[in-house]
């Protein structure tokens, strides 16, 4: 199985566009250029969202396979994680199928989205099938309750697997900024369940840097970029995603 990169860039997400920031990558060519710059700045992986010809969020297996192949050619050894985020457009069944057919060895699935139809057995089957195919699923968790639900779905054996990947989300798209103390309920959940997964944190808003550094101090891996924040620690707007990566990498070097 492929482990999570230590510093992943999430450069665009599903909602923002050039009106939000001119350097936010939309086309595949822009995404590759951004990934190249972010790798040079210190990132070792990319969280991949794709857009259609109108710049809107799209989930498409063929488009994903093409994009992953192009990124692997342009950036050998650079981890690429495909998203299955629905944004209200795609069914859980579609997401589960896409996770297996997108061509990436790293795939993120939001716990609340993937289980929204109540088909828990199908979600567990996805987990098992992913392991058989060498695909590492990262479960996106928006609250400690999602961790509890994940434990109920997977059972003790899979939860104790050190290769289990999770992302703790601090804050949200509705304007709530992530704060370091938001991490504590997640860490309490790990302690309660007595598990040590491969875990990562992302944080929204102007406190992204502070939140990520707090997570790093606790042993977490980090996801940074315009999907969650366009701001530096001092409150200024970053020139581009590479600048956000560079700030985090510089702070990690001073530890």
Image: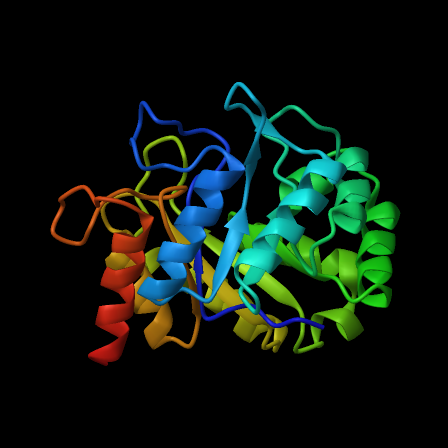
Residue at the spot 66% in from the left edge and 38% down from the top edge: 113
Q: Quadrant of the C terminus?
A: bottom left
Nearest the eye: 150 or 223? 223
| Picture colour scheme | rainbow
Residue at the extreme top: 54
Horizontal relation, residue 7 to residue 142: left or right: left
Residue at the spot 31% in from the left edge and 43% down from the top edge: 229
Nearest the eye: 57 or 94? 57
Nearest the eye: 70 or 177? 70
Q: Kindly indicate the quadrant of the structure image that contains residue 119.
A: top right
In this view, 80 is above or below 238: below
Residue at the extreme front: 73
Is residue 131 visible from the viewing direction of this image?
yes
- Pinpoint residue 247: horizontal percent, then vertical percent: 23, 61
Residue at the spot 21% in from the left edge and 44% down from the top edge: 239
Nearest the eye: 76 or 225? 76
- Pinpoint residue 53: horizontal percent, then vertical percent: 56, 22
Is residue 108 visible from the viewing direction of this image?
no
Total tally of numbered discs in the picture: 0
In this view, 235 is above or below 27: below
Horizontal relation, residue 233 to residue 116: left or right: left
Horizontal relation, residue 86 to residue 103: left or right: left
In this view, 190 is above or below 32: below
- Pinpoint residue 75: horizontal percent, then vertical percent: 52, 61
Q: Quadrant of the N terminus?
A: bottom right
């Amino acid at each position: 199985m492929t482990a999570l990169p230590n510093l992943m860039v999430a450069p665009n997400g599903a909602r923002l566009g050039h009106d939000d920031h001119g350097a936010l990558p939309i086309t595949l060519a822009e995404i590759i250029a951004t990934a190249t710059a972010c790798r040079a700045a210190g990132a070792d992986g990319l969280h991949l969202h794709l857009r259609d010809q109108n710049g809107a969020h799209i989930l498409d297996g063929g488009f994903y396979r093409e994009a992953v192949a192009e990124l692997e050619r342009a950036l050998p050894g650079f981890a690429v994680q495909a998203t299955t985020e629905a944004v209200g457009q795609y069914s859980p069944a579609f997401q589960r199928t896409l996770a297996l057919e997108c061509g990436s060895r790293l795939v993120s699935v939001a716990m609340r989205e993937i289980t929204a139809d109540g088909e828990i057995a199908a979600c567990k089957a996805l987990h098992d099938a992913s392991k058989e195919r060498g695909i590492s699923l990262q479960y996106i968790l928006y609250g400690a309750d999602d961790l509890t639900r994940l434990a109920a779905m997977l059972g003790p054996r899979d939860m104790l697997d050190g290769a289990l990947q999770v992302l703790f989300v601090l804050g949200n798209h509705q304007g709530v900024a992530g704060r370091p103390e938001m991490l504590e309920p997640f860490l309490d959940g790990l302690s309660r369940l007595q598990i040590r997964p491969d875990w990562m944190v992302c944080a929204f808003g102007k406190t992204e840097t502070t939140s990520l550094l707090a997570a790093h101090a606790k042993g977490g891996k980090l996801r940074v970029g315009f999907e969650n924040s366009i701001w530096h620690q001092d409150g200024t707007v970053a020139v581009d995603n590479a600048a956000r990566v560079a700030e985090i990498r510089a702070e990690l070097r001073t530890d």
